[in-house]
Image: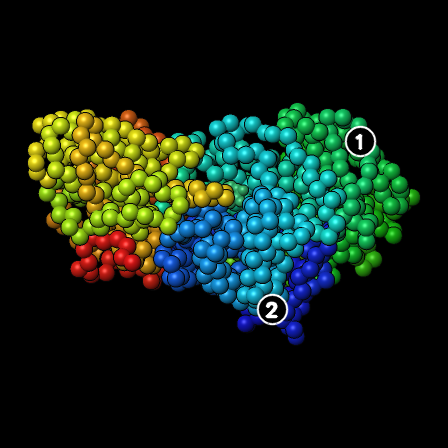
């Protein structure tokens, strides 16, 4: 373990070499692995989207949690549209401060795979293209001059920031840079486009290797990336049957074909996105649970990959209007870390493998070797060897990955001093592989001063503490385990805890230990000047270990929910972390460590027989949440009334569009053409009635993908016509509603579910909003006015940004903001039913006084029946953090990220409930405690957020260009 310092911050990166004299590092690669400063490294990485967590202090939380689980890298998409509300305008401040994000990654000591697009997909609006790009010409993701000019704006801005943080300059931890995302055609133009992007990145100062996520494309020739990669989602995205597994695809052929690069997975399935009306993220987490992680991730390792990134590790939330059509507010993804930042059994499992990839350096360079088949033919074993030091790896699982039978076997492995050897050797014991389990076993592996012949337990980690070695092995509870170590002569063995038998074989110089995995066993083994503390746990015991790097070397901690950091000063180790209950903290520190502090407070310790320091730490104080009461309500759709003054609104006067995908019907009603790219949009159509209008046919597109869940509602002279999803619908007009010869008004409210993701066909430019309106039985002309979010592309609230607010009346008037005075609104209670289609706004405040030093994830829950028809938009302190559709679901709980939430003061909830039929309203609304931790994390409220919209005498307005 070598460390380097920068800007006064001690960094410890596995595989990075000392850079105190010359801070720049080299990043190269060969057909085995990435090589940093000459050292091969195993990349174990997870995806995280900062733009799905609008609270920068919580970025640190996620990065620390990833690092603590043994991830040495984080893969980050940078979302163009999130930073650019308007052509030429780029915002990298506040929640968009990616400089700060990359500094945090540096301080945490985690490498970054930067993925700036320009196209990112990611189930986000237009796949990351900005709203303003929708109305431009030029084929997307091509060399078209219009598109090129547009993306070069973004690349210039984002490359400048990424370039400041590269490992290669010693100024940060950006290790790799991905070019574009999932381009599956290698046409001459696409190749040229890729090459243009690569040239641009290099010209902008990007010096780290360029990578691809194009499923084996762009390997050679024009546009080739340095390290091409595959993405793989073996269980795909249908979470409705979580027990369903697909077969494992064997990537060894791909591995063999690569002659100059490692086998790289920029995206391997870490969970799955869920859709409107879907089964919910618990099901996605079950589908892609710990068993899936173990079996599938190890199968990729068995094929020889040394670069694995998991999509997603923390999914987060599609707050505001960030989602693309089809997906809802939560992007939890069933990932290892929940959207509320809590650790799951998937996290534990990733930690078990991740720690091994870090501890066992020979894993970064291996070749496939043949091996004898297991005596139990339901099982399959694959073997690999490190050509330099002879470490062998045996990957064991069921031949059919889906197999749920419990099986036992013996294995024939090769040991360099004994040749083929059948293990386990202890009579009456076996190697067990339960249904859907897998194991990676080591043989001929040296660490510290120890020589492991083999183990039927898996290695969690090993580290050297001064003059002593420490290793942690683990296995499933109740299963047999056998570990054999070599010594020149019989060592002194002391079983400190648990039941372990030892057997010395002088002929082979081997010490054999046999045990059942049950809790934690401890054995001290001393021979000559070598000393080993061997810890053998079941999985439950193993996941309680945390390995941390200090500038003087690694330390190991056992016990708490999370350990974030360890800093050594003199004879004290200062630990920081989180507890979910009171319990033990045990430190295996450097030999001269005498004192321990936990979250800044010295703790009493006793020295154990294992020469560790044992302390007790407190859990969190209990928390209770207030009931949400004292609601106020206001009508929020004055636009329905024929008398509403829309004179400040834009007229839909455009007759042509640079967007080649507009539907060629006049007038152009497409909301994007008027600068309204996100959220709800109102249309008001004025017409002089002839009296013959017996019906009106309205056609609209709110975004259809993975379901058709956008909706519009329409009124005529204040009378409700009805609702419809994307498509066309004729609504009957009662002649009594019409003012013959006078001004009549059709008001239409549309719900923009976002722009489609893009392939190569311009789909992201598909028009949104109303497309056409014609009368049945009459050719009456309609003059339309349009109003979306206040200011259109000129944001009144740039800190909350382009996705936060749409075009509801209340949003335009700032009713979502904490500073809005609602005292004149009527009081009400929830649930509240209404038979009046339209929009009602509900507001209340609540006070929190959460215990200091506690991380308390809180959600807002809406509880109602699917037989009610409304969609609610939820704001906390002015931030839109949820969209609820009572008759579609599935999401009922909406995370209120701390930082947006004030834990020690007043908070304002505003909910706009749009009743889309005669049985709307708003259900019960409550606060839900998702967890409670005592922590060293200190989330601060964003100091940059305003509490009201800026005072403005602007009329409702849109784009003015
Ligand atoms: C990948 C894509 C990601 C995301 C993922 C599914 O193929 O690169 O951006 O869309 O699929 O969640």
Q: Which mark identifies residue 528?
A: none
Residue 133 in view, yes or no? yes
Q: Is residue 861 above or below residue 266?
A: above
Q: Is residue 392 above or below residue 478?
A: below
> Farthest residue in the bottom direction?
21
Q: Residue at x 81, y 59 (%)?
A: 529
Front-most of 288 and 566?
288
Q: Badge 2: few (under 14), some or many (20 or more) residues near its Cα, within 10 Å?
A: some
Callout in the foreground (2, 1): 2
Quadrant location of the N terminus in the rendered image: bottom right
Find residue 169 and name its label.
2
List x then y, in percent, for residue 397: 70, 33
In what element is the residue under mark 1?
loop
Label 1 CA crowd tier, 10 Å (few <14, some 14–19, many 20+) = some
Numbered badge on residue 373: 1
Residue 949 lies in what quarter of the image?
bottom left
On screen, 432 above or below 768? above
Q: Is 203 displayed left or right of 929 in the figure?
A: right
Residue 68 seen by the camera: no
């Amino acid at each position: 373990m070598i460390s380097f310092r920068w800007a006064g911050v001690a960094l410890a990166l596995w595989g990075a070499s000392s850079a105190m004299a010359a801070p720049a590092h080299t990043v190269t690669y060969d057909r085995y692995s990435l090589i940093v400063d000459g050292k091969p490294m195993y990349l174990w990485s997870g995806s995280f989207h900062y733009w799905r967590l609008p609270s920068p202090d919580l970025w640190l939380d996620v990065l620390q949690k990833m690092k603590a689980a043994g991830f040495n890298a984080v893969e980050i998409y940078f979302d163009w549209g999130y930073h650019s509300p308007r052509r030429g305008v780029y915002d990298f401040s506040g929640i968009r401060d990616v400089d700060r994000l990359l500094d945090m990654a540096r301080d945490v000591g985690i490498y970054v795979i930067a993925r700036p697009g320009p196209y990112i997909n990611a189930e986000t609006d237009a796949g990351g293209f900005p709203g303003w790009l929708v109305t431009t010409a030029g084929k997307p993701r091509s060399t078209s001059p219009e598109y090129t000019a547009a993306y070069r704006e973004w690349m210039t801005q984002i490359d400048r920031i990424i370039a400041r943080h590269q490992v290669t300059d010693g100024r940060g931890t950006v290790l790799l840079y991905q070019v574009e995302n999932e381009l599956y055609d290698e046409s001459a133009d696409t190749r040229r486009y890729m090459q243009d992007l690569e040239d641009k990145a290099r010209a902008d100062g990007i010096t780290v290797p360029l990578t691809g996520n194009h499923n084996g494309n762009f390997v050679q020739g024009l546009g080739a990336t340095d390290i091409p990669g595959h993405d793989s989602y073996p269980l795909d995205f249908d979470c409705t049957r979580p027990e369903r597994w697909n077969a494992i695809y064997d990537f060894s052929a791909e591995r063999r074909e690569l002659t100059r690069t490692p086998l790289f997975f920029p995206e391997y399935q870490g969970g799955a996105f869920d859709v409107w009306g879907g089964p919910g993220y618990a099901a996605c987490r079950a589908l892609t649970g710990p068993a899936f992680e173990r079996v599938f991730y190890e199968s990729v390792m068995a094929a020889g990959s040394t670069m694995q990134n998991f999509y997603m590790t923390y999914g987060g939330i599609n707050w505001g209007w960030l989602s693309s059509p089809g997906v809802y507010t939560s992007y939890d993804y069933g990932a290892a870390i929940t959207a509320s930042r809590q650790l799951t059994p998937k996290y534990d499992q990733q930690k078990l493998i991740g720690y091994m990839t870090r501890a066992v350096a020979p894993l970064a360079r291996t070749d496939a070797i043949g091996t004898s088949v297991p005596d139990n033919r339901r099982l399959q074993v694959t073997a690999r060897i490190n050509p330099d030091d002879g470490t062998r790896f045996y990957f064991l699982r069921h031949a059919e990955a889906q197999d749920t039978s419990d099986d036992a076997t013996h294995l024939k492995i090769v040991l360099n001093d004994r040749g083929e050897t059948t293990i386990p050797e202890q009579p009456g014991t076996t190697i067990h592989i339960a249904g859907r389990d897998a194991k990676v076993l080591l043989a001929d592996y040296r660490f510290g001063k120890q020589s492991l012949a083999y183990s039927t337990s898996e290695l969690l980690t090993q580290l050297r503490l001064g003059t002593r070695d420490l290793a942690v092995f683990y296995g499933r509870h109740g299963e047999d385990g056998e570990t054999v170590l070599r010594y020149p002569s019989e060592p002194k063995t002391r079983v400190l805890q648990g039941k372990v038998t030892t057997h010395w074989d002088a002929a082979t110089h081997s010490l054999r230990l046999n045990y059942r995995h049950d809790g934690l066993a401890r054995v001290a083994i001393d021979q000559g000047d070598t000393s080993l503390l061997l810890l053998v746990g079941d999985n439950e015991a193993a996941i309680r270990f945390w390995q941390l790097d200090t500038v003087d070397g690694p330390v190991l901690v056992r016990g708490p929910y999370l350990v974030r950091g360890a800093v050594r000063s003199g004879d004290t180790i200062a630990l920081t972390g989180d507890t979910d209950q009171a319990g033990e903290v045990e430190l295996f520190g450097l030999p001269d460590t005498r004192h321990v502090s936990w979250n800044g407070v010295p703790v009493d310790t006793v020295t154990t027989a294992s020469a560790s320091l044992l302390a007790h730490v407190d859990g969190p104080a209990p928390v209770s949440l207030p009931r949400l009461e004292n609601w106020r309500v206001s009508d929020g759709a004055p636009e329905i009334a024929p008398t509403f003054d829309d004179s400040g609104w834009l007229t839909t006067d455009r007759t042509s569009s640079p967007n080649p995908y507009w539907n060629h019907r006049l007038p152009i009603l497409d909301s994007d053409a008027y600068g309204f790219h996100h959220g709800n949009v109102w249309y008001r159509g004025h017409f002089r009635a002839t009296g013959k209008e017996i019906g009106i046919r309205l056609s609209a597109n709110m975004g259809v993908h993975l379901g058709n869940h956008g909706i519009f509602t329409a009124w005529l002279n204040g009378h409700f016509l009805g609702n419809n999803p994307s498509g066309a619908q004729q609504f009957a007009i009662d002649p009594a509603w019409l003012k013959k010869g006078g001004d009549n008004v059709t008001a239409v409210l549309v719900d923009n579910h976002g722009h489609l993701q893009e392939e190569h066909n311009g789909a992201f430019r598909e028009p949104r909003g109303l497309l056409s309106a014609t009368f049945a039985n009459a050719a009456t002309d309609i003059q339309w006015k349009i109003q979306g979010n206040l200011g259109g592309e000129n944001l009144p609230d740039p800190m909350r940004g382009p996705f936060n607010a749409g075009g509801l009346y209340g949003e335009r008037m700032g009713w979502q903001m904490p500073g809005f005075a609602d005292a004149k609104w009527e009081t009400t209670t929830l649930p509240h039913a209404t038979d009046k289609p339209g929009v009602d706004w509900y507001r209340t405040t609540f006070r929190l006084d959460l215990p200091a030093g506690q991380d308390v994830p809180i959600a807002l829950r809406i509880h109602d029946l699917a037989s009610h028809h409304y969609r609610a938009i939820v704001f906390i302190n002015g931030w839109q953090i949820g969209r609820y559709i009572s008759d579609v679901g599935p999401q009922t709980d909406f995370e209120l990220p701390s930082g947006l939430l004030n834990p020690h003061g007043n908070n304002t909830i505003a909910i706009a409930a749009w009743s889309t039929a005669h049985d709307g309203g708003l259900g019960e609304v409550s606060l839900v405690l998702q967890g409670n931790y005592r922590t060293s994390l200190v989330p601060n409220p964003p100091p940059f957020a305003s509490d009201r919209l800026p005072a403005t005498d602007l009329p409702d307005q849109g784009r003015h260009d």
